[in-house]
Image (spheres, rainbow, N blue to C red):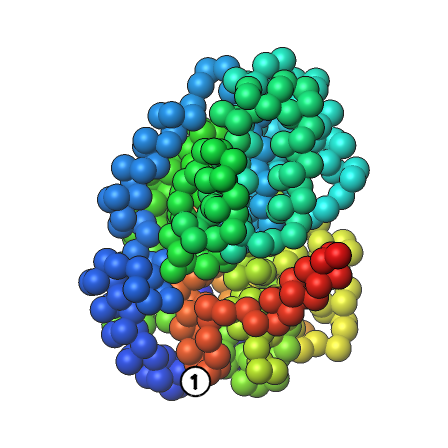
Amino acid sequence: MYKESSAVTDSDSAVAIAKLEGYRAHLTNVAISGTYDLPESSINLPFDEVQDIALKKAVSALASDKLKLIIIVGIGGSSLGSYALYQARYGWADALLTRTPKLLYLDALSPAVFASVTHAIEERVQNPEELLVLVVSKSGTTTETIVNAEALISHLGARFGNPSVIDRVVYLADETSPLAQRAREGKWNLIHTIAAVGGRWSVFTLAHLIPLALAGINTSLLLEGAREGRERGLIADPEENDALTIAALRSVWEWRGFDTHNLFIFAPQCAALGAWWRQLNAESLGKDGKGMLPIVSIGSTDLHSLGQLYFGGAGHIATTFVSVEREPEDLTLPSGKSFSTINRAILTGVEESYRNHSLPYAKIVLPEVNERALGAWMQTEMLATMYHAQLLGVSAFDQPNVEEYKIATRAHLTP
């Protein structure tokens, strides 16, 4: 995964991993407890049978052959996980296909995007049963989510009438949050999220599993992969524990002065997973003057825009290549070469160029792009981020500087 290419020796890695033994034992105890009493408790989500029952109940109540559009109103950790998995499974051409229901996302405040969503509703939805709105916010105070939700519900009320709309909106929020209180006061549908699990760690909670399951994605396999990822991420032997190895490698890079970490994804369908990974790393590690800047590149597309800088620029960038071993479909040219063969040749050439320029890199190879493999990789990355934060001496579970802009925003909006 990293030898011969990362500029990190076995000795370097061993020193970092040795510092993590106590924390690995702590995570093992969190897993044994099966509770949500500690910040790391997100690792218990894939094993939560109570949540699994709640998921099946929610999907049974909300699913319908009539359902055409599901609008997710949320931002950041409330939406990136489900969006990444949805895009990985259905891809950019989903808008052109007849498969339903489709997921649409309202995150940042944009009149143009909002108009596009309402236009899609007007064009495709003839009655309220064909539409579902999921309003997702852990804190319940996120300005963008609150404004988008109010505007969308007002639009739907004007079209279908408020009594009809109230059954088509579901709030997903912490039980004690202002959003949950608002839902109770308005008698809206409300599903509680798990308070101890922060947004960027929440991909295996109901907030993401419900829309994914309704869209036809196999959440059972997703959670099965996540369980496998957690089991491997708690093994004491670093040769068997990818999360430990990843954390040690990235920490050594940072200690050596690399200030940027490039996740170079050679699987275009996984581009949105890069955005999920970027938030996970930035919010968890970027504190106290620490943390590499996480950037995402897509191969081979970005070789034609960023390759010159990577090979000939100032450096200070460490890279992790993500590729896929098996594609579900392939095309063979008259020459006898397949798309997969050519893509592997491109990646091999890129790796050779990186070595020629003494640019450090590591490799992650997914067996294929399916729910099980993606669940395992996402859980591995979350564990690796916890380990990495421990090595840096920062908390992986808060984001104090993000709250600064939220507080300032609310102050400017208060009469």
Quarter occupied by residue 113 = top right
Residue at x 33% of width, y 83% of height: 18
> Residue 395 location in percent, x, y?
46, 75
Taking 269 as reference, is 236 left or right?
left
Give the residue pinned by disc 1. Answer: 12
Q: Is residue 412 visible?
A: yes
> Residue 28 location in percent, x, y?
25, 68
Q: Nearer the viewer, residue 131 or 383?
A: 131
Q: Is residue 350 above or below residue 47?
A: below
Q: Nearer the viewer, residue 284 or 245?
A: 284
Disc 1: CA contacts within 10 A as few (<14), some (14-19) or many (>=20): some
Q: Is residue 365 visible?
A: no
Residue at x 69% of width, y 36% of height: 151
> Residue 407 location in percent, x, y?
65, 65
Q: Which amino acid, mark 1?
A: Asp
Residue at x 31% of width, y 60% of height: 36
Q: Nearer the viewer, residue 363 or 184?
A: 184
Location of the C terminus by quadrant is: bottom right
> Residue 169 location in percent, x, y?
52, 31
Q: Nearer the viewer, residue 57 or 269?
A: 57
Location of the N terminus by quadrant is: bottom left
